[in-house]
Amino acid sequence: MASTQTRTHVANPTEKYFRLNTGAAIPAIGLGTWQSEPEQVKNAVKAALKFGYRHIDTATIYDNEDAIGDAIQESGVPRSGIFLTSKLWSNSHRTEDVLPALNKSLQKLKTDYLDMYYMHWPVALKPGRELFPKDENGHGVADPLDTDYVVTWKAMERIFRETKKVRNIGVSNFTVAQLDRLLRNSEVVPAAIQIELHPYNTRGDMREFAKDHGIHVSAYSPFGNLNPTYSNKLKEKGVEGKLIDDPVVKTIAQKYNATPNQILISFQIALGNSVISKSVHAERINENFTIIVLDIEDVFSLSKLNKNAQFNTAEDTFGPDFVL
């Protein structure tokens, strides 16, 4: 049984925001929609908005923007009250393809602007109708022109400066070296970077670099992931089971009379990161919309679990020719 003092360690998630370098406010907890089928994601978004979520995260490659747009329209929540993000996919990195790709996302989402538009990966695939062009081995096919992500970013900058279609622009899945190079060759500092973050992959290098340059960090996969495809690679880093089953996580969850998921979400917020949690189940969506104010020693204990174990790499996503 948790103590009365521990029970008071709960913050109201509807009131927790982080300030971006543009002055905009990004809600601390967002609903992720990766690998969610259209009908499932429609119900999930409607449930999330009902429970108080105001941050919805999607991407072109998720192939569910239509359903999310429908859910927002049917939710009764004003569009102005929702922080909506999507991401430029890798087959649209050429300068002439960036705006059409954005327009297509806006059309599907049934809105005239995005609160955040991320470059999904610093990887350029062969452009065309096929979102994920693959070779005979199932690996991604690179853009024959090898379009530089800096070129892509400059196209995003122009949209940000010259239109009202994006309120903020950011990047996702960049390394520190890539983000540093982007900053040295651009005019607009990204408002945010979205990366995989959890206690097994704390990315202190990126978090420190981003903080030094006024870039907000948004965490995806806060619960980790034990995809069988990666199991052998992860065992080399000491990952044997699910993060939610880690004894340290479970012990801290018991201390606060909370679930492991709630602790892992709250850990990111304690570090100053907004966090994207994914579920299509209403009960879990509601459960995840909780912020536990962790004692500093618990934040340290979770941080010490770091194994530099990244579950979602460019090589895993695109193939061996795309090691970042």
Image (cartoon, grey):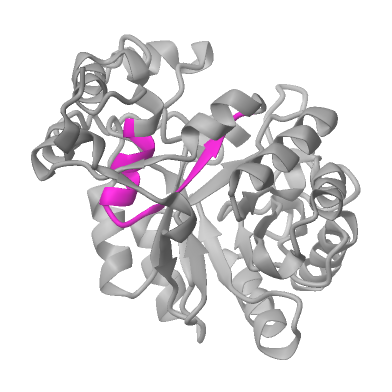
Farthest residue in the left direction?
Answer: 297
Asked if residue 109 is positioned above or below residue 306 in the image, the reply reads below
For the record, the magenta segment spans 263-279
Note whether residue 111 is visible: yes
Asked if residue 159 is positioned above or below residue 48 in the image, the reply reads below
Residue closest to the eye, 314 or 312: 312
In the image, 282: left or right of 315? Answer: right
In the image, 31: left or right of 290? Answer: right
Farthest residue in the front direction?
Answer: 4
Note whether residue 132 is visible: no
Asked if residue 75 is positioned above or below residue 199 in the image, the reply reads below
Residue at 29% across, 30% down: 200
Residue 150 quadrant: bottom right
Residue at 77% across, 49% down: 126
Asked whether 143 falls inside the magenta stretch, the response is no
Numbered label tally:
0
Question: Which quadrant: the N terminus?
Answer: top left
Residue closest to the eye, 113 or 103: 113
> Where's residue 258, x and y in %?
32, 26
Residue at 25% across, 22% down: 249
Residue at 49% across, 71% down: 25
> Where's residue 179, x and y in %?
41, 65
Asked whether 277 falls inside the magenta stretch, the response is yes
> Where's residue 222, x and y in %?
42, 35
Farthest residue in the bottom direction?
Answer: 162
Residue closest to the eye, 177 or 273: 273
